[in-house]
Image: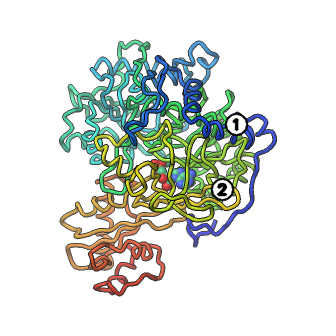
Amino acid sequence: MSTSTSAMESLLVENRVFPPSEAMVKAARVSGMDGYNALCAEAEKDFEGFWARLARENVVWNKPFTRTLDESNAPFYQWFDDGELNASANCLDKHIGTPTENKVAVIFEADDGTVTKTTYKELLARVSQFANALKADGVKKGDRVLVYMPMTLEGVIAMQACARIGATHSVVFGGFSAKALQERIIDAGAVAVITSNYQMRGGKELPLKAIVDEGLGMGGCDTIKTVYVYQRTQTACNMVAGRDKTFDEALAGKSTECAPVPVGAEHPLFILYTSGSTGKPKGVQHSTGGYLLWAKLTMDWTFDLKPEDVFWCTADIGWITGHTYVAYGPLAAGATQIIFEGIPTFPNAGRFWQMIERHKCSIFYTAPTAIRSLIKAAEGDAAVHPDRSDLSSLRILGSVGEPINPEAWMWYYKNVGHEKCPIVDTFWQTETGGHMMTPLPGATPLVPGSCTLPLPGIMAAIVDEVGNDIPNGTGGILVVKRPWPSMIRTIWNDPERFKKSYFPEEMGGKLYLAGDGAVRSADRGYFRITGRIDDVLNVSGHRMGTMEIESALVSKTDLVAEAAVVGRPDDLTGEAICAFVVLKRPMPKGDEAKAIAKELRDWVAKEIGPIAKPKDIRFGENLPKTRSGKIMRRLLRSLAKGEAVTQDTSTLENPAILDQLGQAY
Ligand code: WTA
């Protein structure tokens, strides 16, 4: 892999095509391009009939639906809305009485390597018992419950227990700060928090409950009645009498049976906050019926799941990938899955490969960032190279969260998949609920760096600013022309923002705007994502709003007068955060500048979370602005990359600031 060229601006142009093996085509659920085309044709011909068939075949309904799609209040689309179901029953109860009931549902490997296995039957009992604990404390259908948990089986149990009683969960990633937590609790109006005393990552014990206490202490969280604390480690944590209880206390004497509460198909299964182009994170609201259908179906289509597969998605439950492909999809599909608490580099960077061998993983799904960092590690130390592990159990590889550069793709294909495992490069978003565009392992010829084609029924297209189709070979704006079952329903508490962000009037109000640019190849019509077209950054596959980080910086009012944040390409993390800051004091130099840069980084970590810390901080006496006072972001992006500025700078009041801003601390 090149170190001088960024991952995003790949040197290698891979034009080779990798068709699926004959054996793979033969055995696959969607077999060959004929199989794929037949499904697409079915969706074209009878859109609603297509989805209705799939929803009947893949979801267990307490009350069957009679309406498939209701567009009367578009873009607030409703799917299967008079049907009733329970998501947890669709993941657990449905396997009881079948051979799957005694199958291992979860192989959990802790940070320290301890392995525990839980069958479907055992998982159902644990989820039911926790659901009873929630019920006993008055948590009921429609209530919101905030989950701030480490990557453990208990995190999944918490989510499933909420779903079981019809409570809407909102999971917040363990790397977010007390302030971020408080904002989400207030916005969601949560009645309870489910957390853990500590989390274990890379051999380190990191606090979680203390952060919850700090967040609740910031005020405005009076809706919270109970805080459940999973004792992950032996270390004691502060417990507030009357409010906090340990899992053991909550579960004591509770039955391991709990009837699942049927909810309407449109009932909000969860809210997941994500970054947008303005300062405030958006609470993406998902449905129960449509979401669950897509979680189950994409397990079958994209991963071609077989009963004997061992599935491993490395995403944290704090992100959408950990929702759909850890907490719901694998269970709904009856898979055996691996859940891993730790990090890929502990105790060494061979951990993933060793775990694949240990648990005979057959489907491995991870992010390009992880692959790139493991390539680097393997190139530096033969002892952690995938060759040192027996990876012969692998059958399918997956990639998610950001564009995968062809260099990383080829390495993954050769060194991990030994040129026999197709790579499904899955493009999707928090808002889409599940995969949108991806190769199918037994159908689609692969082209490195391309997410290839939309799944059947997903009407993806590339258009210009006003919504007109653009010919293949020309870059444009990625949209989806028809609704689909697992799409975002609204932004919690902000339906207007939902409409404006995703169905903009300028484009006719009917196209779903993904926020990404894309181009289709002239020959195959394959899609390649070219990156976000809004002010959203993708750092190590984590979504971050530039405005969110700017707001955090300027809220340090004793120090910061003005701030602008842009992304720059980074070999390892895809993009890196670069902040340009005007201080309320003279330009700092040398050690002083370094000290202030550190202070600002720590501040952002406190305001949002360590994942939002700017990598570069640059100081200037001003920011480059147009005559009308708009910050020239394109110019800042050039500076951040270290490129020569080619834009017209004649309108700049003080061109000398370009030299100042060129220097990073
Ligand atoms: C980017 C993660 C290229 C994209 C599931 C999208 C990708 C954003 C891919 C959503 C991919 C995700 N190829 N880009 N295979 N997958 N993205 O909401 O910019 O955390 O809009 O969902 O990640 O990030 P989110």
Residue 287 in view here: yes
Q: Is residue 116 above or below residue 63?
A: below
Q: How is the image coloured?
A: rainbow
The residue tagged 2 is: 525
Q: Amino acid at mark 1?
A: Val
Q: Is residue 77 left or right of residue 186?
A: right
Percent position (x, y) of residue 441?
69, 43
Q: Amino acid at mark 2?
A: Gly
Taking the view exactly as shown, the residue that stands out farthest to the right is 22
- Secondary-structure class at tag 2: loop
The residue tagged 1 is: 30
Q: Residue at x 18, y 42 (%)?
A: 219
The reply to whether the C-beta atoms of the residues labelled 2 and 1 are less than 8 Å apart is: no
* Residue 405 location, quadrant: bottom right
> Which quarter of the figure is the C terminus placed in?
bottom left
Q: Is residue 307 left or right of residue 479?
A: right
Percent position (x, y) of residue 299?
60, 35
Which numbered circle lies on residue 471? none
Q: Nearer the viewer, residue 439 or 63?
A: 63
